[in-house]
Amino acid sequence: MLLKFNKTYILLFISILVIEVLIATFLIDGFIRYTFGDYLVVILLYCFLKSFINASSFYIAISVLLFAYGIEFLQLINLLEILSLDNNHLAKLILGSTFHISDLVAYTLGILTVLIIEYKIYKLWIT
């Protein structure tokens, strides 16, 4: 694992971050707010890590997926309530407040998308 700045991934990170902020700001509920936002957040985290870490795409993707799963399972034990942050809007926005299996599916699909795209790009660069 090497630390190396990657302009492509930082630009992807910033673009997805803007989309996520717009979703969080302007959409109150619905598929895009909840499911698509969760799908994008793992891609966002992946791009952030790839912006600075030159490591295997597979390992970074799996690390992001496990992190997302971990956060989701912390929602199952009411982490915000334990930390007395259940009335903090920013904490709810970042960490979420309720466990949903559909979130796990969205995270998984987001990481699968990343891996498929990375594989396709890698294959194109080799041939």
Image: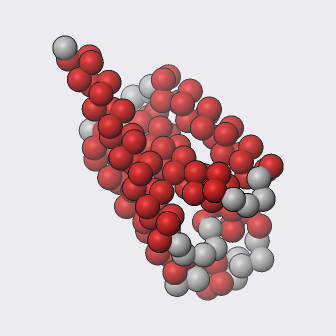
From the viewer's side, name the closer residue of 80 and 35.
35
Splitting the image into 4 quarters, where does residue 12 fall? top right
Q: Is residue 69 left or right of residue 85?
A: left
Q: According to the image, what is the colour scheme of the structure?
A: secondary structure
What residue do we see at 73% from left, 52% from top?
Answer: 24
Residue at image coords 60%, 66%? 95
Residue 90 in the image, given as x and y percentages of width and height: 73, 63
Q: Quadrant of the C terminus?
A: top left
Q: Position of residue 4 (x, y in %)?
A: 39, 28
- Image quadrant for the N terminus? top left
Residue nearest the viewer, comparing 37 with 12: 37
Does residue 67 appear in this view? no
Say above or below: 14 vs 93. Answer: above
Horizontal side, residue 16 vs residue 101: left or right: right
Q: Residue at position x 51%, y 51% from top? A: 39
Q: Nearer the viewer, residue 117 or 15?
A: 117
x, y (%) of residue 107? 45, 56
Q: Residue furthest top?
A: 127
From the viewer's perspective, is 68 left or right of 91?
A: left
Q: Residue lying farthest front?
A: 31
| Residue drawn at (52%, 84%) of the image | 77
